[in-house]
């Protein structure tokens, strides 16, 4: 039997240093369609190029030791797209996991899908659950992949489960506080994002992590997601290190 050499993330450039880094970065991977359109390509080509951007950003998080990354891959509203595009996106998720899971696992990356996953088509659902199970003890980077995700739906589901637990006397109404509520969200145990990145020039939150982004710093760029690579990520991080975060307080 040939034992293959441990696959490592490409680590070509020297690692840039920052005075302060976010613990958790969230990204709305937007602009795939427009990227393709400007090149006269089908939208699928934009999504495919977007997967490569994701690969690069995961690698960069590992290099910089950023421990949490959450990406918006498919929203509860994305089902409104033509069936063909939805099925291409599902296929890309399956392909990504099949192709990358060994490398992700070997580099200590945990895949944690978040969203209403039970209604996803069988193939991506199975692939996601298998990748999540296989990588669940990894500690280098937690990659939260938001799929069939909607921030409002997440909050409603949390409220429903809380109400059930109150009615079953598992918790008391007086026990409900922000920390307890947060533990009913998909992101239980995950610290809130410090930095939200939105490529493609849109200035919207698009139903993404509505609860968790309460104090996140926003960084937007006109660059479409498929062109968002290490250079653009470094720009966002450089900007972040100069932000003064007051969390509602005043400067000391
Ligand atoms: C938004 O661009 C992007 C999406 C709805 C899908 C994002 C998915 C990927 C990058 C690939 C699959 C994900 C994984 C985890 C492998 P858009 O299509 O809305 O772009 P537009 O606004 O320019 O039309």
Image: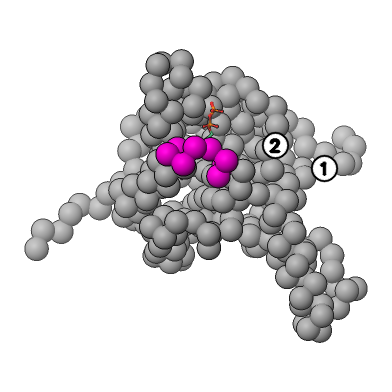
- Between 251 and 36, the one lying in front of the other is 36
Where residue 92 appears, x then y in whole percent? Answer: 38, 43
* Side (left or right) of 86 relative to 30: left
- Name the residue nearer the viewer: 228 or 164: 164
Q: Is residue 103 visible?
A: no
Q: Is residue 204 above or below residue 110?
A: above
Q: What secondary structure is found at the residue carrying circle 2?
A: loop
Q: Is 194 positioned to the left or the right of 75 in the image?
A: right
For the record, the magenta segment spans: 78-85
Mark number for residue 50?
A: none
* Badge 1: residue crowd in 10 Å (few <14, some 14–19, many ≥20): few
* Circle 1 residue: 247
Residue 229 position within the rendered picture, expressed as x and y whole percent measured from the top left: 46, 28
Q: If the image is split into quadrants, where does the N terminus sit? A: bottom left
Asked whether residue 157 appears in the rendered view, the answer is yes
Residue at the image point whose x is 59% and y is 55% from the top: 115
Give the residue displayed 45% in from the left and 56% down from the top: 121
Which residue was labeled with disc 2? 205
Q: CA distance from mark 2 to mark 1?
A: 19 Å
Residue 132 colored in magenta in the image: no
Question: N-terminal of the two: label 2 or label 1?
Answer: 2
The quadrant where residue 25 appears: top right
- Which image quadrant for residue 89? top left
């Amino acid at each position: 039997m040939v034992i293959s050499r441990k696959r490592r993330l490409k680590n070509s450039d020297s690692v840039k240093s920052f005075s302060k880094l976010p613990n958790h970065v969230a990204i709305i991977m937007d602009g795939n369609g427009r990227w393709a359109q400007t090149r006269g390509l089908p939208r699928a080509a934009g999504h495919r190029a977007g997967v490569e951007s994701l690969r690069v950003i995961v690698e960069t998080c590992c290099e910089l030791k950023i421990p949490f990354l959450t990406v918006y891959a498919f929203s509860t509203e994305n089902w409104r797209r033509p069936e063909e595009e939805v099925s291409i996106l599902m296929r890309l998720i399956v392909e990504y996991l099949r192709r990358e899971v060994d490398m992700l696992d070997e580099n200590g990356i945990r895949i944690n899908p978040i969203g209403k996953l039970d209604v996803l088509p069988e193939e991506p659902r199975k692939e996601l659950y298998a990748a999540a199970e296989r990588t669940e003890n990894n500690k280098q980077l937690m990659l939260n992949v938001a799929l069939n995700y909607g921030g409002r739906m997440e909050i409603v589901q949390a409220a429903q489960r809380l109400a059930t637990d109150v009615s079953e006397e598992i918790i008391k109404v007086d026990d409900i506080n922000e920390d307890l509520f947060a533990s009913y969200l998909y992101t239980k145990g995950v610290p809130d994002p410090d930095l939200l990145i939105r490529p493609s020039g849109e200035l919207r939150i698009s139903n993404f992590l509505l609860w968790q982004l309460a104090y996140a710093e926003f960084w937007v760029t006109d660059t479409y997601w498929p062109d968002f690579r290490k250079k653009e990520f470094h720009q966002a991080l450089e900007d972040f290190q100069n932000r003064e975060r007051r969390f509602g307080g005043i400067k000391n």
